[in-house]
Amino acid sequence: MIAMWSSKLLEAVRFPALMQQTAALRPLLILGRGALPRALRRLPLISGGRALAAFAVFATLAGSAAWGAAPPAKPSSDDKFHLKPGAKGKLCLDCHADFQETLKQPFVHTPVKAGECSDCHNPHASAHGKLLEDDPDKICAGCHAGIVPEHASSSHPPAAAGNCTGCHDPHASKFKNNLKVGGNDLCFGCHKDLQTAIAANRFKHSPVDKGCLTCHSPHGSEKSVSLLKSDVPGLCVGCHNVTQPSFVARHKGYPVAKANCVSCHDPHGSSAPGILWANVHKPVANGMCSQCHNDPSSPQALAVKKTAPDLCRSCHGDMIGTLLAANRVHWPTLDKKACLNCHNPHASPQKGLLLAPMKELCGSCHKDAVEKQTRSVTKHPPVDEGACTTCHDPHAASTTHLLANGNTLELCGTCHDWQTHSTHPIGEKVVDKRNKNLTMDCLSCHYAHGSAYKHLSPYDTKTDLCVQCHEELKR
Amino acid sequence: MRQVPSTIGPPPAARRARSAPPLALACAALLAALFGGPAAAAIKLRFLTAVYVDGAGKPLATPEGVACNGSRLVVADSSGGRLVTFTVDGETVTPAGEIVLPQLPSPIRTRLDSKGNLLVLDGKLRRIARVSASGAFTAYVDAAPGGAFVPRSFALDRADTLYILDIAGGRVVVLDAQDKVVKEIALPSGRGSFSDIAVDGKGTVYALDSVGRRVLVARKDQAAFAPLGADLAADADFPTSLAVDEAGHLFASDQDGGTILVLGPDGAVQSRQSGPGWKAAFLRAPSQLCLDGRGRLIVADRDNKRVQIFTMIP
């Protein structure tokens, strides 16, 4: 038994990952690799008598007061590479003299400060760039484990992907936390659209100027979306006093303390008063909340008077009437959520009060159409750019696929001058040789949402395409 | 008549072949033979014939619905605003007539009951109509469950009990012969879009979620649906119609993928049949499916403006 334990111990010394899995040995791990006698670490993987002896030696040492008092320590470069005392770091600087300047910066990464270059780099050889000991993400995680919460509700892609050096300088920096750039400018390096929008806003939200990290966690958020430090409205009411009379008055007496603030407000600021989103539903803009919601004094003040689409019909009667009269509806318009499947009834950054940009919104159900376009060799701009309503009516139509025009020659013709595009006979009088019920139109040879082949063709070569009908020419 | 390969269609690169390697199939068969395990035979479809026109030679315009019972085939031609009937004798399909009713301006789904009467869902009115075997309008199904009610599809069981997929209420409503609500089965909330239901001989109800690309099941005495097997995301783009056979195999038409999926009773995909294309045996925007009880699967091949009949090969 002792022999087996000794063997495991030695193995664990050589392979720390195993140590983690060996629950019985875990307490010994707190001593740290560096605390183990070098002679013991050098022993080969053994069993039997040698292991027993080795374990006995180690157990004696581990039981001594001196070892028990030793603080956890990482193996130093002295240990790893048998350097002369005090040579670590200094030795590297003998060649990397220009690194001295780096060290003068106000924020120096702890291992760098300690001269532990070999914590991250191997001075001899490496399979990784910059002579790194391992993949960069694994090196950082060695000390900074759990920086992205394990079951995060949202995580920052660079952090989740282990691209730590996207934001941090691993050696030293002028900015706290070794950030490459200070303040919001670091975030704006990627979030350029947001920077432009914030700069153009007439009405600022003061936390934005204070810094993105006022509201966001840079690595990940355990419980909230969008890297928020806590959920809305909790985050908002941390600053906004919801009992203040002016706040109550501006919200028409509605108990919004538990509402979703970002349903109406743009947290990054806006050019609309009250930092409302750029597109505001008229009743909201006019402060007519009671047009849809119960009276503010009601116990269920935020509940709506009717559900969609009946509630929406009271104003949008014509549109809903047209929808209901069409031969074919977009079924979600009539399901349980109805209009709210696609629209925000308060305000939105998107035109038409859409919940998200069209490509994202339509693509949330029609994933295959977006995927086909993504894979497509030739891009079809309306699909690629998410202008789905160029061809489809999102509410209802009398055509299959809810096309805005059932005649695809005319529909495609709004962008493409097909008569100059091809001399191939096309039109209602030209029967498709593959199917006597079809006539030749654009969709006879092209997939509108995308194809693995050029020109949205269903086939790799023109010959393959043509011989589908002209079989007599097949070779 | 020709065999339709399981993975056919013009854009092979866009599809994921789902055919087990021959060696794996041989091993599975050997193991089943040795140990008596269940031989999960994958059903294949063999193209039999296609229907393009009615008795007057008028082409089908937008065939979206099909009902069948072995000797009769009814096609719901939505943009044509009509039902087109055929008799089926072996491999011969003969036009029998046309039913045009003002009460059904845009029929999209249809089913035959045990007496040969038709139930038809109209896409424009979003009402289900009863039509006699002779083609006369009898009445609309007068279901009045509480709350909003929008029928998206429906199914019949052996006893002609009517099951309605109500997307406004987020439920399946079960009606007796007098159109009285006898049961409601709640559909799960959350993102998804249910487009069809099917009922087997044991009273098990299956619901097809086109967006979630999954099949849900509610056994006879259950009041809620639960997922059946894994989702179909790897095999389907946007499945919209569902049918179930006596053995519990499920068939789902994939509107955007141009295929028909065959699922085992456990919901696992067994094969993907047909493929996107214009020629006979290929599909474009396949819609309602019907199993005629005589080993044939009939599909409304909507964008190809025809109905196709396949023989199911076990």
Image (cartoon, rainbow, N blue to C red):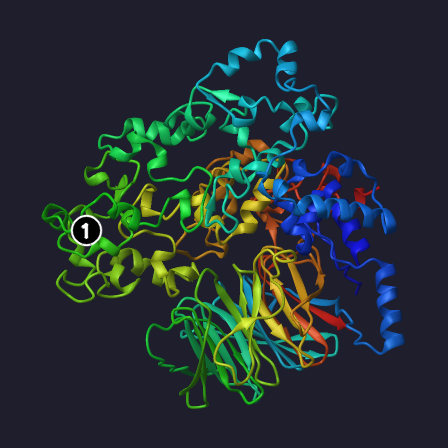
Q: Residue B218's spot in the image, x, y percent?
A: 54, 78
Residue A177, percent from left and from top: 45, 28
* Residue furthest front as drawn: A65
Q: Quadrant of the N terminus of chain B?
A: bottom right
- Tell me if residue B12 can be seen: no
User: In front here: A281 or A210?
Assistant: A210
Which residue occupies the foreground of this view, B135 or A266?
Answer: A266
Report which residue position mark 1 lands on: A283
Q: Is residue A161 left or right of residue A219?
A: right
Q: Residues within 10 Å of mark 1 (few under 14, many from 20)?
A: some
A469 lies left or right of A120? right
- Residue A372 location in percent, x, y? 59, 45
Quadrant where the image shows the C terminus of chain B: bottom right
For badge 1, the amino acid type reads Pro
Q: Residue at x 84, y 64 (%)?
A: B25
User: Vertical placement of A189 versus B311: above or below?
Assistant: above
Considering only vertical position in the picture, is B109 above or below A37?
below
Give the residue drawn at x 37%, y 32%.
A194
Work out whether residue A286 or residue A390 is closer to the camera in this orientation and state it.
A286
Quadrant housing residue A90? top right
Task: Report the side of B53 relative to B104 (left or right).
Answer: right
Q: Is residue B62 left or right of residue A206?
A: right
Residue at the (70%, 55%) spot, across then down? B279
Q: Quadrant of residue A30?
A: top right
Looking at the rendered structure, the secondary structure element under dot 1 is: helix
Q: Chain of mark 1?
A: A
Work out whether residue B280 can be spotted.
yes
Looking at the image, which is closer to me, B137 or A395? A395
From the top left corner, tell me how far across and down residue B194 is, in percent: 49, 66
